Image: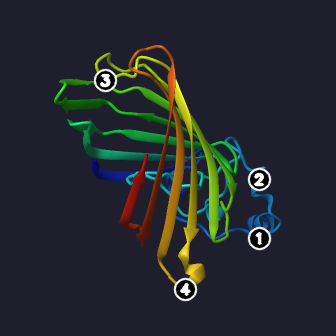
Amino acid sequence: MRTPLTLASVVSLSALAPASAIAQEAPTAAEQAAFAGGNKHDFHLFNPTPKSLRRPLSADRPDLTESPYTVDAGAFQLEMSFLEYTFNDSAGVETDTYAVAPLNLKAGLTNDIDIQFIWTPYIRIDSDEGDADGTGDLQLRVKINVWGNDGGDTAFALLPYITLPVGDEDVSSDDVEGGIVLPFALDLAAVGLDGLSFGTQIEFAFERNDADTGFDAVSTCASACSYSGVRVVRKDFS
């Protein structure tokens, strides 16, 4: 059994934009024409998408399923939890894990691709098998939206990642590990359920085994429904 509790915050930052440009501006005629022509793909990290053409903010935090939507080209987004707590009871071993200020910094590379840097400054693990604490590892991820970024009732993405063992020894994975997440979202307004959305994901992870003789393939699936951004149902399968 795994029980999560999270307090989180999300901040969206604009690349190469002055402080006076924080307010949303109406699109210019040229911007409207570009969007009508499907030319958002012309924008990239060094040629940011105008604010008036950007998608609504979509965060991977604080819930435990990922969003299939990427950050717009040239935009930066910081997602941070103040505190995450997880209780796990596996094979009779109870473990309490506390993560303080874990963060995810995203940068939009193109209209459909962003890069993400995930790091936790402090982790404490209280387990029946022993306690540990320290700085967490660094995870690098690239999200590639396959469809649905700028419209439609569904969206799907590929999210490969790699974890670098840069954390303190007691809480680090000690080895380079990786995997891929396949997130999918469905807007249930299409069937008359306004404000209700459904999300699911499958994750394939390759983790170093306890015997240190190779890697084990681990697959998990999580599904959830939310209403107006509030998580109401969640189910994990692993």
* Left/right of residue 48 with respect to residue 199 in the rendered view: right
Q: Secondary structure at mark 1?
A: helix
> Which sits earlier in the primary sequence, circle 4 or circle 1?
1
Q: Position of residue 198 (x, y in %)?
A: 50, 67
Q: Position of residue 150 (x, y in %)?
A: 67, 64
Residue drawn at (42%, 68%) of the image: 226
Residue bearing the label numbered 1: 29
Disc number at residue 59? none
Looking at the rendered structure, the kind of residue marked 3 is: Val
Residue bearing the label numbered 3: 171
Q: Position of residue 231 (x, y in %)?
A: 37, 65
* Left/right of residue 7 with respect to residue 143 in the rendered view: left
> Which sits earlier in the primary sequence, circle 1 or circle 3?
1
Between residues 217 and 66, which one lies in front from this camera angle?
Answer: 217
> Which sits earlier in the primary sequence, circle 2 or circle 3?
2
Residue count near mark 4 (Cα–Cα under 10 Å), binned few <14, some 14–19, many ≥20: few
Residue bearing the label numbered 4: 192
Q: In the picture shown, does residue 29 fall above or below 193?
A: above
Residue bearing the label numbered 2: 41
